[in-house]
Image (tube, rainbow, N blue to C red):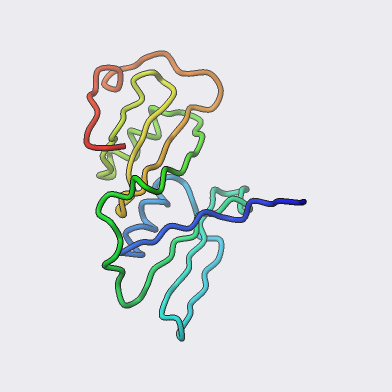
């Protein structure tokens, strides 16, 4: 039996706000599908050069009141980054809360505008501990 990963789908309440968040992570829109009859938009976003690993953002035009305020049942998306500290600083500078700071120089968690948990992992070996991250407390859930 052959198996091939296609994508991960997450529902979003505000398409533009969610796309802006994933763009901060470095993802870019690879393609989009508008369904007039189904009244929804699908936007596929992936890191450059990794278009085969997209996140599908599903936006229902008439709203989606059934979305929980805490999407912990989903689990998380995970991405490796070249510099965990620079990535977290970039996100924080753009208003993203670092829920689990990279105290160990290896792992951090943030949340999308729709409460999707995003794990960021340092590519290769962990970086040496660095302030302000090494003494920063957790914020909220991750």
Instruction: Tell me if residue 9 comes above or below residue 70 in the rendering.
Output: below
At x 29%, y 18%, the residue is: 131
At x 29%, y 35%, the residue is: 98
Q: Say which quadrant the C terminus sits in.
A: top left
Residue 30 place in picture, x, y as percent: 56, 61
At x 44%, y 72%, the residue is: 41
Q: In the picture, residue 137 is in which quadrant?
A: top left
Relative to 132, 41 lies left or right: right
Instruction: Tell me if residue 93 comes above or below residue 1 in the rendering.
Output: above
**11 or 110: nearer the viewer:** 11
Residue 136 place in picture, x, y as percent: 24, 23
At x 36%, y 25%, the residue is: 102
Residue 122 place in picture, x, y as percent: 48, 27
Relative to 51, 72 lies left or right: left
Residue 80 place in picture, x, y as percent: 51, 34
Relative to 28, 100 lies left or right: left
Q: In the picture, residue 120 is in which quadrant?
A: top left
**Callout count:** 0
The outermost residue toward the right is 1
Instruction: Tell me if residue 122 comes above or below residue 73 in the rendering.
Output: above
The outermost residue toward the bottom is 37
The outermost residue toward the top is 128
């Amino acid at each position: 039996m052959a198996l091939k990963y296609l994508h991960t789908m997450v529902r979003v309440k505000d398409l533009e706000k969610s796309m802006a968040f994933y763009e901060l992570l470095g993802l870019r829109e690879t393609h989009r599908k508008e369904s007039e009859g189904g009244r929804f938009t699908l936007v596929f976003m992936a890191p450059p050069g990794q278009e085969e690993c997209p996140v599908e953002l599903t936006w229902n035009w008439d709203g989606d009141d059934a979305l929980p305020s805490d999407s912990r049942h989903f689990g998380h998306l995970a991405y490796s980054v070249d510099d965990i500290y620079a990535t977290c600083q970039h996100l924080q500078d753009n208003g993203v809360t670092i829920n689990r700071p990279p105290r160990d120089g290896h792992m951090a968690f943030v949340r999308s505008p729709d409460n999707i948990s995003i794990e960021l992992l340092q590519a290769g070996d962990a970086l040496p501990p660095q302030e302000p991250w090494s003494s920063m407390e957790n914020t909220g859930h991750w």
